Amino acid sequence: MNLLSWPTALLFAGIAVPLLLLLYFLKLRRQERSVSSTLLWKKAVLDLQVNAPFQKLRRNLLLFLQLLLLAAVLLAIADPVANFLDRPQKNVVIMIDRSASMQTVEEDGRSRLEHATEAAVDYVSHLDADVRAMVISFADVPTVECTFTHDARRLARLIRGIEAIDGPSRIGEALPLAVAYSTNLVDIPGIAASSVPEAAVGDAADIEFFSDGRIADADQQYVMRGTLRYYRVGARNDNAGIVAFDVKRIWDRPGMLSVFVQVANFGPDPIQSDVSISLNGKLLPGAGAVREVSLGPGQAFQDGRPAERDGGSADQDLPPAQNVLFEFFHDSGGVIEVRLHRADALATDNVVVAPIDPPRQVRVLAVTDRWPVELYLTRFMKELEIEDFQLMKPDAFEQAPDDALIAEGRSAFDLVIFDRHDTDRLPPGNYVSFGCLPKIEGVSAGDDIEGEPLIYGREDHPLIRYVNYDGLYVARWRRLELPPHAVTLIEGSDSVVMAMLTDPGHRYVITAFDLLESNFLNEVAFPIFMQNAIGYLAGGGMIADRRLVQPGETISIALPPGAQEVRIRRPNGHIDEPPVPRGSFVNYARTQDVGVYEVSFDDDRAGPELYAANLLDAVESNIAPADKFRVGSEAVESIERDAKVNEPLWPYLAAAAILILLLEWWIYNRRIMI
Amino acid sequence: MTQVSTNATAAARKQALLDPDFLARLEQLEIVSRKIHASRQKGERRSKRQGESPEFADYRNYVVGDDLRHIDWNIYARLDRLFLKLFLEEEELNVSVLLDVSGSMGVGDPSKSLYSKRVAAALAYIGLCNFDRVNLYAYADRLVGRVVGLRSRRVLPQVISFLESLPAEGKSHLTAAARQFALRHTQKGVVLVISDLLDKGGFDDGLRYLIGRRLDIYVLQVLSPEEMEPDLAGDLKLVDCEDDDVAEVTISRPLLEKYKANLQAYCRSIRDYCHQRGIVYLLAPTNHPFETLVMTYLRGRGLVR
């Protein structure tokens, strides 16, 4: 229990308590009555005191009750509140999850986000007057809805205005932002210390977290200061959705499309449903366009990943997830849509869409002047049936006209391989560097490292999948200095050997060693790596997976030469016209909804360029609210949503005071009205 | 005017110690002593001594010096021997009233003092009518007034005047008063102690002085209804009207019950003490009609007949 106005109560106590005692003493000035003799009275009093050892207490009962009454009144004046939680700090950061899973429709017909905002508004309305609060909504990226303010009405209004998006839930940016605001320790990219309002300076704030607890990257975060309290929202858990989606053209038959989806059940009961595929809004002809899937209960999912199951009934034995593969011939562009026909709590994950381009050959360029590398690469490309493979000397590459290297604002090649050639001729595209560095900001090489083994390879990355780096021996490599967002693929004991760097329009795979100073060329790992690289990097040339994003992810739109105007039509029909920068790219981040985004330039002569946003997030699809989640090494337990931070207690105290008053009145009258 | 006069008369009668009608009824009574006492004065009561009353008592041989007037000459004529004829002696009865006029007797409506004075006046009148020697003593912490040796109904106004002149004030000290009384009053007879006996010095020592004088003792304890059923409530500072002693009490049901129990026990202890010593004890609440007390209770106890 906290006293919100204890100074006032203290002031009143300083006046009232001595006054009461004074009054009590005044009351002790008894009324004088003359009697014939006090002989028998004294004896009676003495007898009673002897027979009742607690007579003194009885005599002081009224004073005791009056003190009790006064204490109740003073406590009521102090405005006590029952804290079901720790007392909030002076600064409170309210974080509200607005990711896709928060669109789950609960039993009462309202979405989880509505429940969350209601709980947050309720929380705000019970805050002390001297507590400042700010509001951050987040899905994969945070949005500061309101900076620190005392204005509870404004906070409530802004909280009610938060809308859900179809994106995944990530607190990788939101939590540092909240911590930065709450502690004035701004150390995250894009947030300058000077931008933090003065209100945030001071004690670490409490972070009040309204969510269903389905957060993919929570365990990778940590809270430096303050307290994170988690208010669990939601109850339903019956959902099935599409959690994986891939569209590929088969290399040897470029007209064939292979569409892969994985459907998963996250509910407690087995389900049966249909999965259909449409092209340009029309169901594909033939019986294969609709598949039935039978899925077992999904409790076996742990953190969105299927787990091993024990035996059970027939339905119980069904796997909670099933893959469906559609293969059909289609040698032109369009939009593929795969739909799971089931009305469940979350509709966002029941449909996936993908724009496809007409088939074309993968174009690969290798820039090298060393014959062993040329020989191996040529051989592998031939094995991989890459018909459009070109070799170019470094000098020739540098002297080549732009037209030879750039097409429609991007690299003319789907993949460019550099062998010991540092260059800055890097139009948007995909690059693999062996023993050299792309000349871009933040990338540099340091001293050489010799004779150290390779320690770690990120085997879950598509580039390293099935690459046996254990048998790889590298005599020497250069210590790489890379930007923080670079992803390490292979590393030694204390330095990166291979990394991938993704910048808008560019993807670089940087290898720190010379191919000829390792046995990479001679190992099976090399053709596998090259196949992964062509499939992962150059595959975009076949199915533009760079145009498949998760909701909320930024789209980098390559501008055609001379483009003056860009129009983007969102899935809900709204048209955005972002300003066209000087560069060759427009970054567009309002990809909040699942569906197709149509990008058109100037006069629409070339037809719209299509992008698609799909949820494809098993963590979001698993809508069962989590009782707890881990932030770093710390488990955050949920708090009941309707738990109020401050429950005013003064009405109870006032009632108690009245009862005490009545009791005192009754006792007093019982004593004097014999 | 007439109404005012009537009210004044009623008040005066109310305050008057003895009502004329009641006086007439009192004349029928006489004070009875359970003992035969010797007195210095002749009276209408039979004495232990032979004397000159018309009532024959006995004969005895003449001895030299006897009064020749008492020789029964008829016996001498027949027997030729001198015999003295003895007659019963009749002496007066000493009736004493020891009246408490301390401050505590002023309590009550009518006050215990008035009630006590009426009883004293009535007894005095009865005694005077029967030619008893009536002595009235008033006491508080000592004897504060007295009229003694009254022997005729003609002195009734003197008795009334004396009683009316006694204010209820001062501390009560029966022991000291009884000691003084015993020293001064050597005659035997009947003594009536009228008091509330709410004496912090105790009642037993005082009565013992009277017992030592071999008096026929009657004790009349006068209490007011306010003392027997106190009408008190709340937190009070009770002040003793005699010695200003203070008792701070918070009136409660247990306290009242305890007070009443103590009062009963106190009265019972007086009664038992008196019974054990041949003293007649009578409790007289002032709400009992005074006439009833005299005509019924005192007669019942054998003080008058």
Image: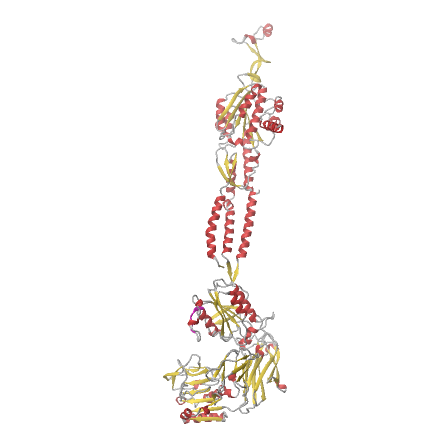
Which quarter of the figure is the C terminus of chain B placed in? top right
Task: Examine the rendering and report whether any part of residue A632 can be seen.
Answer: no
Residue A440, x across and y down, in percent: 41, 84
Residues drawn in magenta? A182-187
Work out whether residue A258 or residue A110 is closer to the camera in this orientation and state it: A110
Model colouring: secondary structure
Residue A528, x across and y down, in percent: 47, 88
Farthest residue, direction left: A447
Residue A331, image quadrant: bottom right
Give the main secondary structure of the magenta stretch. loop
Work out whether residue A609 or residue B220 is closer to the camera in this orientation and state it: A609
Vertical placement of residue A630 versus A583, above or below: above
Residue B5, x across and y down, in percent: 61, 27
Vertical placement of residue B268 versus A424, above or below: above
Confirm whether the magenta stretch covers residue B298: no
Residue A579, x across and y down, in percent: 49, 80
Which quarter of the figure is the N terminus of chain B placed in? top right
Vertical placement of residue A375 versus A545, above or below: below
